[in-house]
């Protein structure tokens, strides 16, 4: 039974499962989406305490109502050019699967756009970016909504395991 | 799962019926039995009940021999087979009990089919099915947690009492306590299906029962055996905990060797007394079972009368208990004895009328006993009081069961084994044994409430229970004496169990509250207000939050007693090994420490105790020469002083040989010849690795590792350790530990725009460096500062943490001299901001193991500050600067 499920997922990239609500945000001219269930909250930019011996995209830690949580700069993570923070810059706090249970992590994005309901037929599997330094694993799929492309992120991959692995490599 | 369970029950029932109906010589019927057994084995295997599977397989082989004509197919043979099936039912219901299995083997042996207990259990354990035995006890986590926690307690108490008993062999209180503990462990282990532990505890219990009955003497071999078993159980419990926490697979304990030891010890008894220990039980079991079968059908005839009896009986039992307790105060008060006698009499009468035979019998016997007391044939003593109380408890559970039967139908019926009571009453009345006390009988109390409680969260258990048909034989007592006795004996300390995560959550939230409160209060607008009412309210708020914080913190504290108790055993073993006489004196066991610290202080304590006994206390002759009593004294005390818990270990030995340490340190190049260090400073060098002053390496200590372990362990807890020694008088170890692990005392420092917290306990001093004492090595790659004759390497914190805009001029910054693991460093920072107690927060799984950072905390302004991990800081400088100037 599990096998057939896996096959199904492979054949259609599990696109059926991808349909649902997404929080979309901007990074430069690109629009990204994360599954709404992963999002814990959106907070304005606050003072971030730098943590030594971490990769450059880890900005540091913040105090989220008594909990200390790490914050990463998504632009830096995606090797995009850095940009001055504006009053629209904010931190999207997501919950991802860490080594020991779920952890909360903040992501700095240029601005948050909206919550979109994306249907199955609007989603396409991500194209292969082989040869470039794009990490294919980071994307669940692409959605075309009103002529605009939304890149659906797999946050678990973006900041979860792969992020941790890199962090250890560098330190 | 539940289905398979039900299938097994059904198959066993079917088997029982078929065997009962079988005619000798009817081989086709025997063939049917074989089929059923085959299925049974399959089902048992699917349930991972290897023992049951082995039993079924044994019966199957025996039946095959019957078909082959190797065994006679007489009626007796099949009777024995029927018994075997009953035993299998018991095993299915009650778990693998060595006693039951023993009987099982006995049944087969009596018809000429040889099988040993080891074959059933051994094969079960070594068969490939073992991997399938996927830690069945993991089913019920709550129960398991309970078991782990309790068993650790009991094992601790066992050890203490065994040692007490060794000093004072006649101490029946201690013996009883040990017995009770093993009994409880047996029961709880059984309830979580840890059969190996349960079996071992059971065997030990049997051994102790004989000791208690005076058949075996409590000599050193028994003591040793019990201690070893305690150790084995402890390691099993540790293993279980590991299995539980880490999900590794469970490997059962090989209890064989221990059982052999116990058997050997028991063997002595058989020769001495010529009685097999299990015999009386066997005799009483069978007739009881028959009786009960009839009874279970009968007593339901008159429901009205029965329910009347139940409610009345409870009242009677209540009054019995009250009166007995009163009697304990005035043992000779006849009026009270009468008050106890009457309700028993009533219960006897009505239960007899209702055909509740077991209850009737027990009440009747007790009545007889009380009658003897009333007539002056016996004097009311604690033994009788214990019996009466125990009987009362048993009657209550039995009557409760009757009431269950009334509500749920006959399948809820349970059998109670009262033979132990009857025996005991008999003995007491005939004046045979006055040593026997409460535990013998409580051992046979079966309390349904407890079984039920244990079974409730466990679907499999509750599946079995209703199915335990009236035809099955006596339910073996599985539950504990302490549960029914404890509430009376101990002062009642009401407590609840709380998930540690919830507690941590509370502590965190309270920490936040304290910070928020400070932030609000220091808000410039509010601080600028000068309203007396507001100030008063703030003061009140501060008081409340401080109280709240204290309470929340105290919830994680436990007395240090348990850790101390383990030292008793250690000192005993050590003094035996070294041939020294040592008295251990303990003080302040009630001092509370952070629960999370309990495990971490154990190792350092062990090393320090070893050191005190092995190096500190001299051998008896030397002590005599020095004019000291032959037996040395090691004092272990704990107390709270300021913000610290202090643990002291003092011995009255010869003290530390300062000269020896100085020479060793010189030898190893740790100090200069002309360095002017005080004796105290030299003595404390024993905490450095590899610096042992022992002339010979014993298996106890002397490798120069111990004290290093102590220091590392204590520093990990953010504590420190020091040694004070007076030559000829003794040495004193002082261990300073923080009150709690959740809060540390720190100095907040600024480096560039970042703020870091340095744990105060590691700070020696801080200063604006005097450039006269500043030196460089290799063109500035290594920097040192001379502080009081010691060259201390400088660590530029901004450099290793990559902080921008920090002060880079040594002369403009501040150096904080820290010490960690015996190494000193001068940390260069921009500014000291102040001292603060901070709540430690983990940076989360995402950012753990960052070198030099122990965690984070929320500072007064709501921002996060990082707490330095000094050993990390030092080791990261080692990477940069490998000149290695220690």
Image (tube, rainbow, N blue to C red):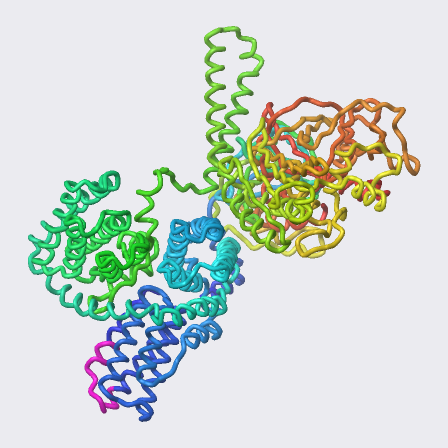
Question: Residue visible at 75% across and 38% down?
Answer: B683
In the rendering, at what x and y percent does residue B348 appear?
Answer: 12, 54
Identify which residue, B699 or B749, lies in the foreground.
B699
Q: Is residue B228 above or below residue B483?
A: below
Identify which residue, B368 or B590, lies in the foreground.
B368
Instruction: For the C terminus of chain B, give its image quadrant.
Output: top right
Principal SS element in the magenta part? helix
In the rendering, at what x and y percent does residue B728 appear?
Answer: 71, 38
Number of labelled discs?
0
Left/right of residue B547 with respect to residue B392 in the rendered view: right
Identify which residue, B182 or B59, lies in the foreground.
B182
Instruction: For the N terminus of chain B, give its image quadrant.
Output: bottom left
Q: Is residue B243 visible?
A: no
Identify which residue, B761 or B134, lies in the foreground.
B761
Left/right of residue B762 with respect to residue B86 in the rendered view: right
Extreme residue toward the right, this view? B779
Q: Is residue B80 above or below residue B669?
A: below
Q: Is residue B28 magenta?
A: yes
Determine the image quadrant of residue B10: bottom left
Q: Is residue B255 above or below residue B630?
A: below
Q: Report the magenta residues as a range.
A: B15-29
Q: Is residue B495 visible?
A: yes
Left/right of residue B809 with respect to residue B22 in the rendered view: right
Question: Residue visible at 37% across and 38% down?
Answer: B493
Q: Is residue B786 magenta?
A: no
Question: Residue visible at 44% across and 61% down?
Answer: B197
Left/right of residue B433 with respect to residue B534 in the rendered view: left
In the rendering, at what x and y percent does residue A96 appear?
Answer: 54, 46
In the rendering, at what x and y percent does residue B249 appear?
Answer: 51, 62
Question: Residue visible at 31% across and 72% down?
Answer: B88
């Amino acid at each position: 039974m599990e096998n057939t499920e896996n096959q199904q997922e492979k054949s259609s990239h599990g696109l059926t499962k991808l349909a649902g609500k997404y929080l979309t945000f901007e990074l430069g001219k690109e629009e990204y989406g994360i599954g709404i269930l992963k999002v814990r909250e959106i907070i304005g930019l606050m003072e971030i305490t730098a943590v030594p011996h971490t990769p450059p995209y880890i900005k540091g830690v913040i105090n989220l109502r008594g909990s200390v949580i790490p914050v990463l700069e998504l632009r830096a993570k995606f090797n995009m050019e850095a940009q001055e923070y504006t009053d629209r810059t904010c931190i999207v706090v997501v919950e991802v699967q860490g080594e020991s249970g779920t952890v909360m992590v903040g992501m700095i994005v240029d601005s948050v756009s909206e919550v979109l309901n994306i249907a199955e037929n609007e989603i396409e599997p991500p194209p292969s970016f082989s040869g470039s330094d794009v990490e294919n694993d980071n994307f669940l799929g692409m959605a075309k909504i009103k002529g605009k492309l939304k890149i659906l992120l797999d946050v678990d991959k973006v900041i979860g395991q792969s992020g941790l692995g890199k962090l250890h490599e560098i330190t | 799962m539940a289905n398979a369970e039900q299938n097994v029950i059904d198959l066993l029932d079917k088997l029982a019926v078929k065997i009962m109906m079988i005619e000798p010589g009817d081989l086709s019927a025997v063939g049917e039995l074989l089929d059923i057994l085959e299925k049974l084995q399959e089902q048992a295997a699917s349930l991972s009940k290897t023992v049951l599977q082995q039993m079924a397989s044994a019966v199957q082989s025996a039946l095959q021999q019957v078909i082959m004509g190797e065994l006679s197919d007489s009626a007796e043979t099949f009777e024995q087979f029927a018994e075997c099936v009953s035993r299998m039912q018991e095993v299915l219901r009650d778990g693998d009990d060595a006693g039951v299995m023993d009987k099982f083997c006995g049944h087969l042996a009596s018809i000429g089919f040889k099988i040993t207990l080891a074959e059933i259990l051994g094969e079960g354990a070594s068969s490939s099915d073992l991997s399938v035995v996927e830690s069945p006890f993991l089913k019920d986590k709550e129960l398991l947690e309970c078991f782990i926690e309790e068993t650790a307690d009991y094992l601790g108490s066992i050890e203490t009492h065994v040692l007490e008993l060794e000093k004072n062999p006649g101490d029946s209180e201690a013996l009883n306590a040990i017995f009770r503990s093993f009994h409880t462990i047996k029961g709880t282990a059984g309830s979580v299906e840890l059969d190996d532990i349960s079996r071992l505890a059971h065997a030990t219990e049997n051994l102790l029962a004989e000791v208690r009955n005076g058949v075996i003497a409590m000599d050193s071999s028994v003591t040793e055996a019990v201690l070893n078993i305690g150790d084995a159980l402890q390691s099993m419990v540790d293993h279980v905990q590991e299995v539980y926490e880490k999900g590794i697979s469970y490997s059962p304990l090989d209890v064989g060797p221990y059982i052999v030891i116990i058997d050997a010890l028991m063997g002595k008894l058989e020769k001495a007394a010529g009685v097999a220990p299990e015999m009386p039980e066997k005799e009483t079991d069978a007739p009881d079972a028959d009786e009960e079968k009839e009874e279970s059908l009968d007593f339901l005839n008159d429901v009205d009368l029965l329910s009347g009896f139940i409610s009345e009986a409870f009242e009677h039992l209540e009054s019995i208990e009250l009166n007995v307790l009163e009697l304990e105060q005035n043992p000779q008060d006849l009026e009270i004895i009468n008050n106890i006698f009457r309700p028993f009499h009533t219960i006897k009468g009505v239960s007899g009328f209702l055909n509740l035979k077991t209850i009737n019998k027990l009440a009747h016997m007790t009545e007889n006993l009380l009658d003897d007391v009333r007539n002056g044939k016996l004097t009311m003593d604690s033994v009788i009081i214990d019996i009466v109380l125990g009987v009362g408890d048993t009657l209550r559970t039995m009557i409760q069961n009757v009431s269950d039967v009334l509500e749920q139908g006959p399948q809820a019926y349970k059998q109670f084994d009262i033979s132990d009571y009857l025996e005991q009453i008999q003995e007491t009345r005939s004046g045979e044994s006055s040593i026997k006390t409460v535990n013998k009988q409580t051992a046979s109390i079966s309390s349904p409430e407890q079984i039920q409680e244990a079974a409730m969260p466990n679907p499999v258990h509750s599946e079995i229970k209703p199915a335990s048909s009236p035809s099955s034989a006596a339910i073996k007592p599985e539950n504990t004496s302490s549960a029914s006795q404890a509430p009376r004996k101990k002062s009642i300390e009401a407590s609840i169990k709380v998930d540690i995560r919830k507690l941590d959550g509370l502590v965190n939230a309270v920490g936040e509250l304290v910070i928020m409160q400070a932030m609000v209060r220091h808000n410039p607008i509010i601080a600028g207000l000068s309203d007396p009412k507001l100030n008063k309210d703030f003061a009140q708020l501060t008081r409340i939050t401080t109280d709240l914080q204290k309470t929340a913190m105290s919830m994680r504290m436990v007395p240090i007693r348990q850790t101390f108790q383990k030292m008793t055993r250690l000192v005993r073993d050590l003094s035996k090994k070294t041939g020294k006489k040592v008295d251990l004196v303990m003080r302040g066991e009630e001092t509370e420490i952070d629960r999370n610290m309990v495990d971490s202080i154990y190792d350092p304590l062990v090393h320090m105790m070893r050191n005190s006994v092995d190096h500190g206390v001299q051998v008896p002759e030397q002590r005599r020469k020095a004019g000291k009593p032959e037996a040395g004294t090691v004092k272990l005390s704990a107390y709270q002083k300021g913000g610290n818990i202090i643990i002291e270990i003092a011995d009255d030995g010869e003290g530390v040989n300062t000269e020896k340490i100085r020479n060793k340190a010189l030898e190893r190049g740790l100090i200069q010849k002309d360095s002017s260090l005080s004796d105290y400073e030299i003595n404390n060098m024993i905490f450095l690795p590899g610096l042992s002053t022992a002339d010979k390496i014993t298996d106890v200590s002397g490798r120069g590792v111990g004290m290093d372990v102590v220091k590392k362990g204590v520093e990990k807890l953010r504590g420190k350790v020091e040694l004070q020694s007076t030559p000829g008088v003794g040495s004193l170890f002082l261990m300073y530990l923080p009150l709690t692990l959740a809060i540390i005392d720190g100095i907040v420092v600024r480096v560039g725009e970042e703020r870091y917290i340095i744990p105060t306990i590691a700070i020696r001093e801080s200063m604006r460096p005097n450039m006269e004492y500043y030196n460089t090595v290799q063109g500035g790659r290594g920097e040192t500062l001379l502080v009081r004759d010691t060259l201390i390497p400088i660590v530029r914190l901004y450099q290793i943490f990559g902080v921008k805009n920090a002060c880079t001029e040594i002369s403009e910054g501040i150096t904080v001299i820290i010490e960690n693991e015996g190494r000193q460093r001068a940390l260069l920072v921009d500014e000291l901001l102040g001292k603060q107690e901070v709540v430690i927060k983990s940076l989360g799984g995402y950012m753990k193991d960052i070198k030099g950072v122990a965690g984070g905390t929320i500072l007064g302004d709501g921002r996060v500050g990082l707490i330095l991990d000094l050993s990390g800081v030092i080791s990261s400088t080692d990477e940069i600067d490998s000149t290695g100037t220690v």
